[in-house]
Image: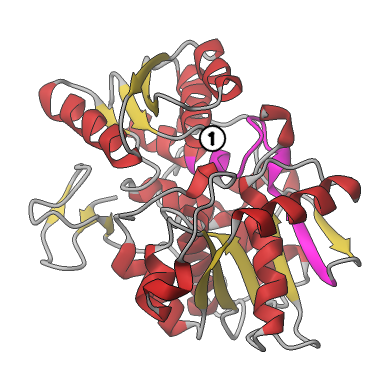
C-alpha cells in the first residue's frame, strides 16, 4: 500500500520519511469485510496474522516474515486489580516482535536488500531476528552503554552491531546518516508505519480475548510511543469497523528526566528527577510527538513521569508475584498506582496493562 503524509498530503510508494520531515502513515487503514467479529473466521493459531484484514502488509501469506508471534496471554493480576497482557513471552522477549514481523514483511514486499535500525535494545533484537528469518542482512545502531545481553541477542541473529557514543538521539542520527549514504532500508520502530501496523494488533487481541469488550483504560510505557500509538490505532480501527463501540482511555508512563509528553501536559516541574532504570524509554524527542498528543486528547488520556525509586519498587513487586519482566516495563504498573491516586482511574475501572519485556535479557 502507498504511504501518505498526514501533514502535507504527499504520497509515496515507499519512503522512510516525508520530504517535509514528518512521519508517514499508510494511505488507507484496511478494515474487515464483515461488520461484526462474530462473522470473522479468527483463529488464534494464526497468531497476530489472524487479523490480516486489518493489516496493510502481508496480503500474500508467502510474503509474511513470521515466527508464530501473537496472542500473548491475558492474565488476571489481583494484587494490582488489573489484567496484565504478557507481551514479554514473544519470540525475542518483547512486544517489539509485533512491529518486527510487519516491518520485515513490508521490507520483503518492497524488495529491500539490507535493513538498518537504531535501538536501545529490544527493537534491535526484534528487527535483527526477523531480518534473519527474512534472509536479509541487518545492521543495528545501539547506544555505547547498551546492556550486553541485548547486544548478544542482536549478534546471535547474524546482524552487525554499531555502537554510538553520546545521546540516544546521536544513535538515531548515525543510523539516518547510514540510510542517506547507502542502499539500506530503514526498518525504524519510531518512523516506519509498518511497525505501528504491527503493534496495533495488541488492541485486536485484547478485544478478542475479552469477547469484544473494550477496557476502560490501558496503561503502557511511553518512549517513542510504538505500543501506545499501536493501541490507539488498533482500538480506533476496531471502532471504525463496527466491531467495538468505544475507545479506552490511553495512559502513558514515562521516565523522570525523559518525559517530554508529560512535560508538555503538566509542565517541567512535574517531570523533574532522573530515572536510569527505565532505560528502554529514554527518549527526549519522540518523532511521533504530535500523534501521541492527539491520541491522548481523543481518548481523554494522559502521560506522567515516574521516579527511579518508584519503578524499582514496582519491579520487585512484579518479580515477587511471578512476572519476570525487565525494568522498563515496570513503569506501567507503577503509573497505574499513580493514576489511581490522582483519580484518573476510578476504583471500578476495568484496566489492562501490558508487561512489555522479559527479565531474561538482564
For the residue pair 90 and 135, the one nearer the viewer reads as: 90
Judged left or right of residue 15, residue 63 is: right
Q: Secondary structure at mark 1?
A: helix
Q: Position of residue 316 (x, y in %)?
A: 81, 48
For the point 32% across and 24% down, the residue is 164
Residue that mark 1 sits on:
122
For the residue pair 144 and 358, the one nearer the viewer reads as: 144
Query: Could one spot residue 39 in this view of the protein?
Result: no
Q: Position of residue 124 (x, y in %)?
A: 46, 30
How crowded is the residue under tag 1: few (<14 C-alpha within 10 Å), some, or many (20+)?
Answer: many
Quadrant assignment, res 223: bottom left
The tally of labels here is 1
Coloration of the structure image = secondary structure
Query: Could one spot residue 291 in this view of the protein?
Result: yes
Q: Position of residue 55 (x, y in %)?
A: 47, 53
For the point 73% across and 42% down, the residue is 325
Look at the image and give the residue range highlighted in magenta. 81-99
For the point 42% across and 80% down, the residue is 266
Residue 317 inside the magenta-drawn segment: no
Q: Position of residue 119 (x, y in %)?
A: 42, 34
Is the residue 124 above or below the residue 224 in the image?
A: above
Residue 95 inside the magenta-drawn segment: yes
Judged left or right of residue 231, residue 169 is: left
Q: Quadrant of the C terminus?
A: top right
For the point 44% across and 71% down, the residue is 262
Quadrant assignment, res 311: bottom right
Judged left or right of residue 353, residue 174 is: left
Amino acid at each position: 500500500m502507498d504511504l501518505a503524509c498526514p501533514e502535507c498530503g504527499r504520497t509515496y510508494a515507499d519512503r522512510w520519511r516525508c520530504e517535509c520531515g514528518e512521519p508517514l502513515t499508510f494511505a488507507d487503514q484496511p478494515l474487515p469485510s464483515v461488520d461484526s467479529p462474530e462473522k470473522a473466521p479468527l483463529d488464534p493459531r494464526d497468531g497476530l496474522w489472524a487479523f490480516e484484514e486489518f493489516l496493510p502488509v502481508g496480503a500474500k501469506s508467502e510474503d509474511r516474515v513470521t515466527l508464530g508471534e501473537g496472542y500473548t496471554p491475558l492474565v488476571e493480576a489481583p494484587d494490582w486489580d488489573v489484567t496484565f497482557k504478557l507481551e514479554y513471552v514473544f519470540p525475542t522477549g518483547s512486544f517489539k516482535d509485533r512491529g518486527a514481523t510487519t516491518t520485515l514483511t513490508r521490507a520483503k514486499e518492497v524488495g529491500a536488500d539490507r535493513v538498518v535500525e537504531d535501538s536501545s535494545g529490544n527493537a534491535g533484537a526484534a528487527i535483527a531476528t526477523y531480518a534473519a528469518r527474512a534472509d536479509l542482512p541487518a545492521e543495528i545502531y545501539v547506544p555505547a552503554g547498551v546492556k550486553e545481553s541485548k547486544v548478544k541477542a542482536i549478534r546471535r541473529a547474524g546482524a552487525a552491531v554499531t555502537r554510538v557514543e553520546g545521546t540516544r538521539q546521536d544513535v538515531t542520527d548515525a543510523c539516518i546518516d547510514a540510510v542517506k549514504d547507502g542502499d539500506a532500508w530503514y526498518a525504524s520502530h519510531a518512523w516506519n508505519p509498518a511497525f505501528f501496523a504491527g503493534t496495533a494488533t495488541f488492541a485486536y487481541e485484547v478485544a478478542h480475548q475479552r469477547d469484544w469488550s473494550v477496557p476502560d483504560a490501558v496503561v503502557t510505557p511511553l518512549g517513542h510511543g510504538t505500543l501506545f500509538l499501536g493501541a490507539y490505532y488498533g482500538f480506533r480501527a476496531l471502532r471504525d469497523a463496527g466491531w467495538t463501540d468505544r475507545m479506552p482511555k490511553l495512559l502513558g508512563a514515562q521516565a523522570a528526566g525523559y518525559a517530554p509528553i508529560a512535560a508538555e501536559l503538566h509542565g517541567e516541574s512535574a517531570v523533574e528527577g532522573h530515572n536510569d532504570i527505565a532505560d528502554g524509554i529514554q527518549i527526549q524527542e519522540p518523532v511521533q510527538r504530535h500523534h501521541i498528543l492527539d491520541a491522548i486528547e481523543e481518548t481523554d488520556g494522559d502521560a506522567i513521569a515516574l521516579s527511579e525509586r518508584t519503578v524499582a519498587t514496582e519491579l520487585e513487586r512484579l518479580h515477587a508475584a511471578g512476572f519476570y519482566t525487565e525494568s522498563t516495563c515496570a513503569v506501567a504498573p507503577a503509573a497505574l498506582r499513580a493514576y489511581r491516586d490522582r483519580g484518573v482511574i476510578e476504583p471500578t475501572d476495568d484496566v489492562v496493562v501490558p508487561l512489555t519485556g522479559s527479565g531474561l535479557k538482564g
